[in-house]
Amino acid sequence: MKRNRQNRTLRTITLVTLAAMITLASNVFFVTIEHVHLRSGTDLSIYAETANIVSTTVRALRGNIYDRNGTVIAQDNRTYDIYCVLDPTLVNSEGNISYIKEEDRKKTAEILADVLKMDYDAVLKLLSQKGIFQTELGNKGRSLTKAVRDEIESYKLDGVGFTDSLQRVYPLGTFASNLIGYAQADESGNISGKMGLEQILNTYLTGTNGSRTYQADKQGHILPGMRETVVSEKNGYNVTLTLDQTIQNALEQSFHMTEDMFDCDRVWGAAMEIKSGKIVAWGQSPSFDPNKLEIEEYNNYGSELPYEPGSTLKTFTWAAAINEGVYNGSDTTNGYAYCYGSDGKGNPVRVSNNEIGCIYNAHHANYGALDYDHGLIYSANSAATAIQTELITPEIHLDYLRKFGFFKDVGTDGLPEAAGILNFSEPSEKLSLSYGQGSSVNVLQMLQAYSAIFGDGTMVKPYFVESVRDAYDPSRVIYQAETQKVGRPITADTAKEVQGILYRTVNDSDGTAKYYQIPECKLMGKTGTTELAVGGTYESGKTITSIMCALPAEDPQVIVYYCFQARYDQAAHVRSDAAVNFIRTVALTYGFTGDIEPVTEEEPEETAEYRSWNMPMLLNHSVDYAEKKLNAYDCDVYVLGSGSTVIDQFPRSTDTVTSGQRVFLLTDTTSFVMPDMEGWTRKDVAALWAVSGFGFQLSGEGKVVSQSVPAGTTVTKGSDIKVVFE
């Protein structure tokens, strides 16, 4: 009985064990083959499919930025880094070798060293390392171009592969860089705008990355039957700007010319189509190369640097009076000074006893009884203050400036903007505003306001962004700019009358902007010179010199504005080569030629009664050399100073010189012997004034009839030289 009981117990244990083993085997079978947990019924396939899942990002290209003619300003470059697999276990699903075999190392090293311009022994050493999965080849194996990658791949080398990355590049370097800005990759490799239009337009320019997700074996290979999901990337939109490469390059070239000539602190400028508001050139110096990112100045001067514009703002004083119907250009005013007091309400009034102070013209020039038209042509502060207080009122003047868009943001394409500061409380501040000092503006405001002056009285908003288009289908327009008319501060008749005065400012023999004339076409314009306020005072010894002009004069199409900040130079508007270079490029690019025949450089003909030629460059030459050089020309040469070397000259090199013209050679900045000026024109005296840097007071019209310093007298800096014309 006992034995039977033991046998039954043994059989029971055996059956239970067998049942357990069958259950375990069933679970293993269903988990392994069917991906189902037998007891719980759980579907385990979702867990199995996540094993060795690899997900990679396919980076989208950032949109390109183009100039108006399709020249690339900014684009993404896809670069490649090389890697070399050394692990002998890496064989792909077809059984092919996916690593560099030992017997292939020398051949592979030879090819890579040749293509990458590396040392063969160094490459071979890297390929001969033990115990590592793969190796890279250092700096020379990184950021490779597609052409280099394709060349290496043409050799079909086992175990050599590439990873790719994106880099933002700027083929034109410093081209409008403080406007364009830059974009940069973050730690994850995503590129985004950090400054300028790259940042402002980041939403448009940024693409959507794609992805590739797959199951891989332990070596990272996709095996047959494993899943792979690909989501295509979508590149960013392309942006086309209004900038013109030819005109922009000329602007930046002119910056360098100005810096060399005046050793200036900063230079800035722009050109804009009057009727559309399209800005075709915009820049500043110092700037930076976005490929190098050695940035000293982050501000965009044209929108973020408010400054006192000086006499270029006088135009709006005249425009206000003309538009109010109270202006007669032949009426006269005191052409020397405006002495003022207060009416008790904070407004200035003219007085005879110098109650508060006097406003004088530049260099205390005395024009006598000056007509209002010549007040603008000569840029007389005394005339500007008289118009503001006697023809109109300071409040009317300010109202017009506001209508012209000053002291508020222009709102161009989302640019950060500093609108400037209006100082208009004290009588002196109100008077200063009439001639462009005491309050500040920016370039965008100046271009917008002058579009009404040089146009038909209608003011248009400046802009840079012409269009945003789909990178895959350029016919699909995401954004298209349109001209925005933002006001009509003056009538067409007023604009025409102001233009007539500004035409004379450039083209009259005694106009302050006469040195900006070009051979391609006639201009109209206004100069500006303003003292630079530092710490609330005008004692810095520095000025902002500017020219605002439009061309061609008979039908203005383009505004050109050019400014620089440097130590005061009385001849700054005479030494106009840099700005003229820029203006001429605008004229040539737009085809504004034919009004004036350019003078070709040639020796004067002996038999000609009237001759013209281009002035030679005489700076840094000896006086003897200069005089011998000029002997071939029929001109009157005046040597100023007792030095032996020419340090300045008038006319400037390449200027047109005609028979009998006076030529001045400066050799000393401290003194010179006064010539006999009887019969000289204002242009002659202005030339002597400009090249010598001495102060003159001019009065009357016509030709010189008297001079306060007799001919033959040695004059020194600070001498009071009065010249009377009749």
Image (tube, rainbow, N blue to C red):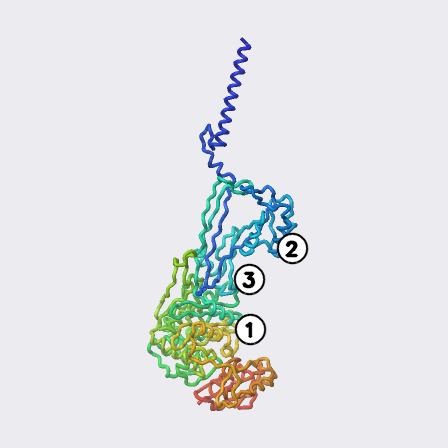
Residue 347 vs residue 291: left or right?
left
Residue that label 3 marks: 294
Number of residues whose C-alpha sits closer than 10 Å to that of mark 2, classed few (under 14), some (14–19) or many (20 or more)? few
Label 2 element class? loop
Label 3 crowd (10 A; few <14 / some 14-19 / many >=20): few
Q: Is residue 626 above or below residue 22?
A: below
**Mark 1 residue crowding within 10 angstroms, few (<14) / some (14–19) / many (20+):** few
Amino acid type at circle 1 is: Asp
- Of mark 3 and mark 2, the one earlier in the sequence is 2
Where residue 431 sits, quadrant-wise, is: bottom left
Q: What residue type is labelled 2?
A: Asp
Which disc number belongs to residue 119? 2
Residue nearest the viewer, comparing 461 with 427? 461
Residue nearer the viewer, 257 or 6: 6
Q: Is mark 1 on a helix, strand or loop?
A: helix
Percent x, y of residue 644: 61, 84
For discs 1 and 2, the disc positioned in front in the rendered view: 2
Numbered mark located on residue 260 in the image: 1
The amino acid marked with disc number 3 is Glu
Q: Distance between the residues labelled 1 and 2?
A: 45 Å
